[in-house]
Image (tube, rainbow, N blue to C red):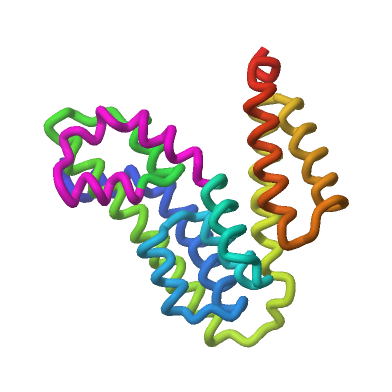
Amino acid sequence: MSFLKIARFTIPVFMGYVPLGMAFGLMAVKSGIDWQYALMMSVFIYAGSAQFLSVTLLAVQTPFFAIFIAIFLLNLRHFFYGLSMINDFKPLKGAAKKYAIFALTDETFALLKTLDVPKQDKTKTFLLITFLNQTYWVIGTLMGAFLGENLAFNAKGIEFCLTALFVVLGIELYKKERASTPLVISLAIGFLAIWLFPASNMLVISLLLCVSSLVLFRKRIEK
């Protein structure tokens, strides 16, 4: 399978990753993070929403332990992605396999799972798609960081874009699943956490309570 044919598969991801990467780079720079560190986050962390969350929490001087817990819970879904890709990644060896596991994002996972690739082309195709998708994100980050460094404007409140992103994702997920119980539980815990707990610990406590509640009431939710 040719490079151009494989690259065509990634066009939808390209259309999303470049503007989102730009938003991250811009937000990082305007939050006081040097563009080099923003770039390093996209190269060595490459976690999309977790990068946005990291910048937001760092900007308000959140304790590192709280950031660790928040990012861990946010990315917990990747454990399940990885388990479902075990057989697909078996042909990969050494550094290629490690990189494919590291760079498995939501969009890359969805793309790899929907492609019908001949077995003899799977290793090359999967690895190239994964690499191209990260390249789009890095390019977007660089573009956004450049604009942030050279474009003078009032960036106050730009960190709210993460909140807006999660609100939109939550609405879209609800429209798809139509499961009201998890939504009601999460909203109730969120409002109670804002009211009851200090700002420095509210996020971690509310996330832990949400996860515990959803696990506890899983059978009822699935009915």
Q: Residue furthest right?
A: 195
Q: Position of residue 21 (x, y in %)?
A: 49, 63
| Count of marks placed on residues | 0
Say whether residue 92 is magenta: yes
Q: Residue furthest top?
A: 223
Q: Is residue 195 left or right of residue 73?
A: right
Q: Is residue 14 left or right of residue 53?
A: left
Q: Position of residue 177 (x, y in %)?
A: 65, 26
Residue 1, placed above or below residue 69: above
Give the quadrant of residue 220: top right
> Majority secondary structure of the magenta segment?
helix
Residue 156, placed above or below residue 68: below
Q: In the image shown, does 23 or 184 lie closer to the viewer?
A: 184
Region rendered in magenta? 75-103
Q: Is residue 69 left or right of residue 193?
A: left
Q: In the image shown, does 203 or 143 lie closer to the viewer?
A: 203
Look at the image and tell me whether residue 56 can be seen: no
